[in-house]
Amino acid sequence: MLLTFVKLQKIIPKNWTDGLVVKNLWNEQDAQSFLDNAGPEEADRQLALRVYTSRLIGQDPDMVMHGGGNTSVKVKRPNIFGDEIDVLHVKGSGWDLETIEAAGLPGVQIEPLNKLRELLALSDEDMVNLQRSNLLDSTSPNPSVETLLHAYIPHKFVDHTHATAMLALANMPNVEEVVKEIFGDKVALVPYIMPGFELAKVAADIFDQNPNVEGLHLINHGHFTFGPDAKSSYELMVEHVSAVEAWFNARAAQPAAAPSSTISANSILPKIRASLARAMKAHTGNQDQAAPFLDLRANDQILSFLTRDDLGDLAKRGVATPDHVIRTKGFPTIIASDDQASVDAAIDAFVESYKAYFARQDARVSDKKTMLVPTPNLFWVPGLGLIGAGANASAARIAADLGTQTIQVMEWAEANSGFYPIKEDDLFDMEYWSLEQAKLGKAKPKPLQGKAVLVTGGAGAIGLATAKAFKDQGANIFLVDRDQDSLLTELGSLGMDHDGAVIDLCSAEGPQQAVDAMVRRFGGIDILVSNAGAAWSKSMLDMDQDTLRNSFELNFFSHQKIAQAAAKVMQVQGAGGQILFNVSKQAVNPGKDFGAYGLPKAATFFLVKQFALELGELGIRVNGVNADRIRSGLLTDEFIESRSKSRNISAESYMAGNLLKREVEASHVADAFVALALAARTTAHIMTVDGGNIEASLR
Ligand SMILES: [Zn+2]
């Protein structure tokens, strides 16, 4: 059985053709529980409801995604002198509406913000500085780049989304006509201006001229609603988005029948990784350039979209809302066939075109920029699906989510007056805006960030400890185990952007299936930790063929087969890789009645050397760990008890029976795997983790 768990928190796209997708999620009991947890102060109660409806918006990917959109509430609070002042709580940079808390809505004094409106111009640096210096709590995150717009709308609650339907509307050339048709005078239009001071002033002037509107529609950008309380502002947003969805659904073109897949994911994904890593290396000069993660999405809607005659034209149009550009770049790359030469040609063409775009634009602007890595983050592969690319699984997922949403935006808009987003100058200004790039964070990446790590026997003590140790170093993990229940539990403990599959590695196809499932999920494989194993105990005199052959199947052949399958993917990727085996001290230091275990382990010990010898020229390092006496499925408490009793010692003394006189734990084995993964010039090495045992030490 093969079962892959794709643990995407937001499974998108939904089936948009089913009709209205945005729902009113307001629930009196939930709202009350937010109020119950707030303090008695009126300002805190309003803020609690602001948190509640922000989350309602955040949990619907058709409202906002991945840090997009923002919300605010205006309250009165006493300052340190006891004077009552007006305060704006607005979404802070780095917070996501889906999971926001009160701390994610920093409070800013409104009066100084209002004074700014009289200025003719204001630099971004001065705007950020003034907002920061008027925070109630100086340790708060930076208030949103759209803070001033929230401040200048006089309503108490303000909600801003990049809802899918609104983006389709916002990018149509006849947006003015359609807004009038749907909303009459209830919604005013704001022309496209990059977020910040100028947009806030223009939007505020438009509001002042139309003070009775329920919302503002920002061309090429998104939508605002507002109201006297949390519920009415939120419900207006739901009402407006639903009205636009209904308008599009009434005019939706019949989608073409989805073709069946013609390109194999397992064939093309490692080639795309290889090509991206090569192009990135050419730019960064980093010889150990990590290959990006890939996140493939395929459903009927995507496959049908990819059959469109105008696909090449649509690929040159741009982004559905400006802040997508930092995640997806401006345009997707179309790949039409799965041979390496076609993949390389498509990616090289993107890189050349990106460099030309950068040169043109950098010549236009006065403050000179440094070019970002010029490789694509989004792919359209007709016959396969849409692929997001990113430095780790999370970045690839975000690119894929936004790319998927954009397909719906394009289809809706193209079925009407067309999809015509912001043009090149505005796109560049947004992509190279320091306040946008700041959203991506500048923390130094962890040593194994960008590494896709496959751990077999992932639900056992050593497998799970190893997965966690690699995760702590920044890697994304794919766990394989044959026990579904424990695998699900362990995956839950790893959290988002790690995944796994239930596979029996002793089945004929199991090892290949494990590697295929991993490649399909993350695009490839960088590190294999071949860990699955089990012990059989029998004397050589009583040994039957079945016992010995079963042990060889798991403790030797499954390791040989999965290493071979992983190495083949690494060869295509062309970026080196690593294979790590969990061997055993039994490989060199036999224990009585453990022949059935030790014999295949001795063969696996040799396997380390044989693979290291043959894979070295591909840059693939192969190492192993010899561990002993670790509490696990192999060494159960009952077994420890019987062993220690037969030696007339306590279980503790038995477990600490080594040179260091300390029990060796699964985490120590995990640390050894990580140490080998980080030892850049080490291959064909076996590291012993047994607390010290001269008989089992290697020459
Ligand atoms: Zn926005």
Image (cartoon, rainbow, N blue to C red):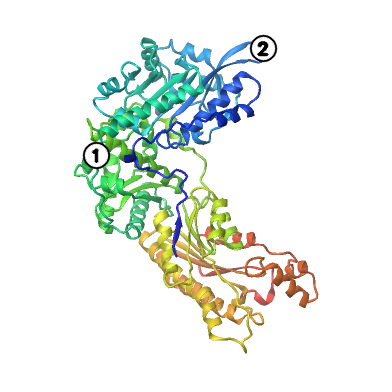
Is 382 situated above or below 667? above
Q: Reading the chain from its start, which is encountered first: label 1 or label 2?
A: 2
- Whether ligand 1 has any atom under 8 Å from the Cβ at mark 2 is answered as no
Q: Residue at x 35, y 56 (%)?
A: 269
Q: Position of residue 34 (x, y in %)?
A: 59, 29
Q: Quadrant of residue 591?
A: bottom right
Residues at marks 1 and 2, CA–CA distance in whole angstroms: 58 Å
Residue 2 in view here = yes
Q: Quadrant of residue 63?
A: top left
Whether residue 536 sits left or right of residue 659 in the image: it is left
Q: Which residue is mark 1?
A: 314
The furthest residue to the bottom = 541
Q: Residue at x 31, y 59 (%)?
A: 264
Q: Quadrant of residue 414?
A: top left
Task: Indicate which disc residue 160 carries.
Answer: none
Residue 195 in view here = no
Q: Position of residue 16 (x, y in %)?
A: 34, 40
Is 226 situated above or below 320? above
Label 1, residues with CA under 10 Å away: few <14, some 14-19, many ≥20: some
Residue type, numbered disc 1: Leu
Q: Which residue is mark 2?
A: 82
Q: Residue at x 60, y 82 (%)?
A: 595
Q: Nearer the viewer, residue 287 or 427?
A: 427
Q: Nearer the viewer, residue 666 or 119?
A: 666
